[in-house]
Image (tube, rainbow, N blue to C red):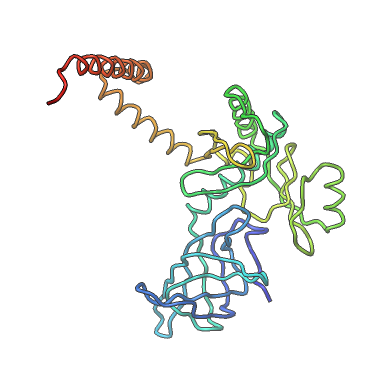
Amino acid sequence: MAAERLYYTSAQLDSDATVEDIQLVSSDERGQLWQVSLNRSAFYPTGGGQPFDTGVLIATARSGALLEVPVERVEEDERGEVWHYVRKPLLEGAEVQGRVDSARRVDHEQQHSGQHLLSAMFLRELGAPTVSFHLGAESATIDLGVKERPSDEDLARVEEAANRVIAEGRPLTVHWVQPEYAEEMVRRGDLRKLPEREGPIRVVQMQGIEFNACGGTHVNNTGAIGGVVIRRVEKVKQGWRVEFCCGLRAIRAARRDYHLLDGIARTLSVGTKDVPARVAALLEEKKAAAKELKKLKALLPPEA
């Protein structure tokens, strides 16, 4: 049987489990790679645009010593089994404790919940639907299914609307609904689409904002998203890609941007707010110098 997925219903990061199966995957310069299945797991596998959790599996050796085995990645196979990839083998039937990396999990929860909120605000404010989502190591992106680029004013309005909802601390709750009821929710317009799966469907509700059929991890209320910042927009094949970051990522990005801007300002001996004008002036000076150089070269006698 597939593992009980604790992240579906609980925010717990530590869990006791039993090793159900272990298989050797490969051997390389780093050693052997094994995949381990458990009877229950809090580790989220890659899926739905969200990366996997990492952490450790802790077992007790016959000597009584604790063996900590890092979990490098987590994946789900076509049968719905969750596999934890490790570099040390564990015995089938062994009792282990799984411990998810809390910092990575919280970061992913903030970005994923922030994506739900940002997508809802783009739809509400601009009528722009989200057609895909990707959560990367530094930032996250959503692709909007629209032909025209959202204006800077539109982006600011969406960003501010999302941050107002964050400040309200609206709860996020999980509901399991039967497919027939989920289809009725689609017909009513409460859900935009359903996943291709059998059995009950997990619906994440952001109070007063949206319902979303989603199997990912989320914060308990919008306040825990910690803020959302839209970073940039670029054209892609299916519309416009919006890069954003939430929570601690947004703070780190703002700090990094300021240090970069401050360094440029110091180099140019101007204040940070004067950097754009100073750079523009330098570019104009460069163009003028290039023109003058071209004139001077024209006055030189031809080479022998």
Identify the residue at horizontal 63%, vertical 32% (top origin): 162
Look at the image and tell me in which quarter the N terminus lies.
bottom right
Above or below, 20 against 180 in this view is below
Above or below, 73 against 152 in this view is below
In the image, taking residue 254 as reference, residue 157 lies left or right, namely right
Residue 240 picture quarter: top right
Above or below, 50 against 157 in this view is below
Above or below, 98 against 208 in this view is below
Which of the two residues, 256 or 16, is positioned nearer the viewer here?
A: 256
x, y percent for residue 297: 20, 18
In the image, taking residue 173 as reference, residue 187 lies left or right, namely right
x, y percent for residue 234: 54, 35
x, y percent for residue 225: 57, 41
Look at the image and tell me in which quarter the C terminus lies.
top left
x, y percent for residue 202: 74, 56
Extreme-left residue of the structure = 304
- Numbered circles on residues, count: 0
Which of the two residues, 138 or 4, is positioned nearer the viewer here?
A: 138
